[in-house]
Image (spheres, rainbow, N blue to C red):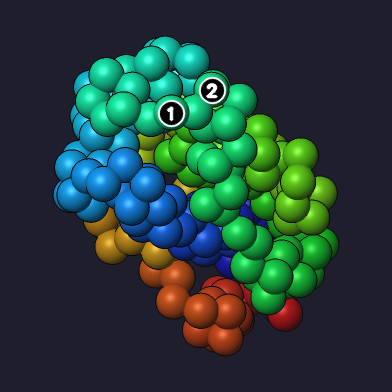
Amino acid sequence: MAIEAVLSDLGGVLVECESDRLMFQVSQALGRPFDEVLKAVYHEELLLPFELGQISSEEYYAGLKKRIPLPWTHDQFVHFWNDMITEKREMTELLPAIRKQCKLIALSNTNVLHLEYIQKTFPARRAFHDWIASCAVGCRKPQPEIYALALKRVGVASERTVYIDDRPEMVEAGKKAGLIAIRFENRAQLERELSKVGMKL
């Protein structure tokens, strides 16, 4: 059975998000414990609404400043926030070969700042036929709704759709949605897994 679509996660698969580096820098600059900074950045009343598109980046930053005394302007925050993301070039180089064989869709839990930064900055952006981001659709992995939405958008049956993610709980959710779910480890491993389902890379 030929594969007609590939849904790929972004962070941990196509880009690295070095959030610990940013939080260590903030911790050092403010003289605050790392765990305090970590708790503020990932506070569920802030990050979850941000990733679901329920609050703006300005609102997220204002909420963050209430928890830790960041000295930046919003624009400075945006710079440092996006600077934590780096491209995985070996994966960017693989994407055109996948795109030639099927529809290629980004499926990611992310916020509007990271989404726009990736779409404007990284060469990988040119490989995707469509983007499904939690901040744009109002639901997130591992909720079943986002997988159903992705299948509806791509217009391909689940048994003909590969889903790639680096997090085990997301892979399991993809399997429950009927997708051919692959846990990403590295490019060589992914190529082997894709070849098992008939893709030629």
Q: In this figure, what is the number of numbered marks? A: 2
| Secondary-structure class at tag 1 | loop
| Along the line of sight, the residue nearer the viewer: 29 or 124 | 29
- Which residue does the numbered mark 1 point to in the structure image? 71
Estimate the x, y position of residue 25 in percent, counting from the top left. 40, 53
Q: Residue 47 vs residue 93: left or right? A: left
User: Separation of disc 2 and disc 1 at Cα?
Assistant: 7 Å
Q: Quadrant of the C terminus?
A: bottom right
User: Is there any visible trace of residue 8 in the rendered image?
Assistant: no
Number of residues whose C-alpha sits closer than 10 Å to that of mark 2, classed few (under 14), some (14–19) or many (20 or more)? few
What residue sits right under mark 2 in the picture?
73
Left or right, 8 with respect to 44, comes to right
Using the rendered image of the protein, determine whether residue 195 is visible from the camera's viewpoint: yes
Q: Is residue 113 left or right of residue 45?
A: right
Along the line of sight, the residue nearer the viewer: 109 or 28 = 28
Task: Identify the image quadrant of residue 199.
Answer: bottom right
> Within the image, what quadrant is residue 154 found in?
top right
Where's the N terminus, which quadrant?
A: bottom right
For residue 200, which quarter of the picture? bottom right
Above or below — where is 186 with respect to 32? below
Using the image, tell me which numbered label, if any, was put on residue 45.
none
63 over 3 or under it: above or below: above
Which kind of residue does numbered mark 2 sit on? Thr
**Image point 27% across, 30% down: which residue?**
68
Tag 2 secondary structure: loop
Residue 186, above or below 106: below
Position of residue 97 measured from the top left corner of the image (x, y, whole percent): 78, 69
Amino acid at circle 1: Pro
Please state which of residues 199 and 135 is positioned toward the viewer in this rendering: 135
Residue positioned 65% across, 61% down in the render = 87
Which residue is pictured at 38% across the width and 16% down the height?
62
